[in-house]
Image: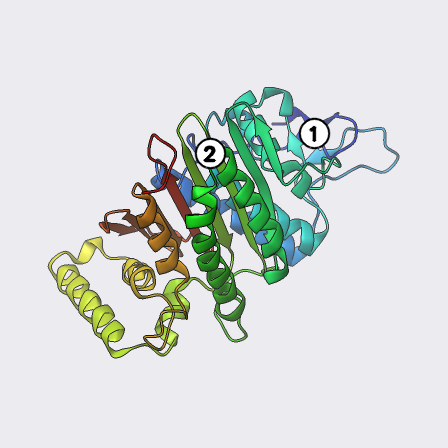
Amino acid sequence: MAYRVQIWEGGEVEWAISSTAGRKPPSPLCFDRNPDDTYPFFAALRAGFQKAIETHQGFVHRPEGGRAFPRISTFHDFGQLSDISTAASVVLAAEYQRISTLVDVVPPTVNLNKWNPNVYAKLTQLGFFEILGIEKKVRPVVNESGKTRTMRIVRAQNLDALESIDEALKQLALFLDPSDNLSENVIVEFLTGLSEAITNVIHHAYADGMEIPDRHINSLWVTATADRLENSMTVVVYDQGATIPVTYPKMERLEKVTRYVERAIRRRLERALRRPSSSHPYEDDPTYIRAAMRYGGSRTDQRHRGLGLPQMFDALKRIGEGSLSVFSRGGWCKRTHNGRFTSGALSYSIGGTLVEWSVKLPTQGRTR
């Protein structure tokens, strides 16, 4: 059975024929609120894109002569999507940018006229259609919409991009706190941690010899949102590298870190022996993520080295309300401002490492 759809590749909208009715993404598309559906959706998307990368095949077939409608084999029906989180938007954009870079083509946008206006507006603010190469207009790094300001997704391949990220985050901080307390007292510390995290990605996540299942483009993606109504700020960082559970066990660690990891894995194995049917390949992933969040990546006790994630948490503690969440391969860990951890593992990989730093300022708009 064939289906008539509208496709958009940056020029005029045109009719095309699809061999399938389209794959419906889960809604909400969110790793936090709907992980059981969101993880497998991205795993399937990544597998389909990887096949296209390996075969260097495009997504739209145009019959010779131009008389017949273009044809597509299948598509993702984002018209069925009513809610997408910022973190999921970043991972989606990264997957599309990877295939765009490696194959020089991306899947067309299908039935855009049926998309939820809020989903379309959010992805537009984040610069999703610019990343696809469909929208040619280059928006400012920080975009304003009512009581919200959004830093469009910035792709970084080295520390050179940190300057524009630094400036954008300071703009968002001043938007929430014109007194500049947030910018001066917290954002500088957070940016130091972010710089360290980016350095860790460059040195470890894409290092030679690291096990990375899919082809990558040696990049990470950063975005942020400030909401004046909620008096909150969220920063999201994502990379498609080797992940913390892969890289962390291969690094030299302090003895106390090694003991911490070994104890945690031993307890997990003891539980698995009592419930063998509940285990899966990513069960140990939260242990390594939690260790990285607690101790960082340092081989020494020097406070100024290897503290990307711990330093992000320190900045969070100074504000007094919020959380730091890390999703890496099949594991996730969330640490709230009071130091409390929650964690878990799924049987699907997120395809890299995702960090989400969320803070809420005190009502007077000043740091504690």
Q: In which quadrant of the rendered image does the C terminus lie?
A: top left
The number of numbered badges drawn on the structure is 2
Query: Residue placed at 21% from the left, 69% from the top?
Result: 260
Left or right: residue 337 versus residue 119 is left
The location of residue 87, given as percent across then percent down, is 46, 42
Residue 8 at least partly seen: yes
Would you say the residues marked 1 and 2 are in contact, meaning their CB atoms lie under 8 Å apart?
no
Q: Which mark is residue 7?
A: 1
Q: Tag 1, which secondary structure?
A: strand
Viewer-side residue, 172 vs 277: 172
Quarter-of-image position of residue 307: bottom left
Q: Tag 2, which secondary structure?
A: helix
The location of residue 359, given as percent across then percent down, is 37, 41
Q: Which mark is residue 210?
A: none
Tell me which label, 1 or 2, sits earlier in the chain.
Answer: 1
Query: Residue placed at 18% from the left, 65% from the top?
Result: 269
Q: Name the residue under label 2.
A: 176
The location of residue 96, given as percent across then percent down, is 61, 46
Label 1 and label 2: CA atoms lie apart by 39 Å
Q: What residue type is labelled 1?
A: Ile
Q: Which amino acid does label 2 sit on?
A: Leu
Compared to residue 103, the image places residue 251 above or below, namely: below
Viewer-side residue, 323 vs 163: 163
Query: Residue placed at 39% from the left, 33% from the top?
Result: 365
Compared to residue 337, the image places residue 229 above or below, namely: above
Farthest residue in the left direction? 274
The location of residue 282, given as percent across then percent down, is 32, 59
Query: Residue placed at 52% from the left, 70% from the top?
Result: 203
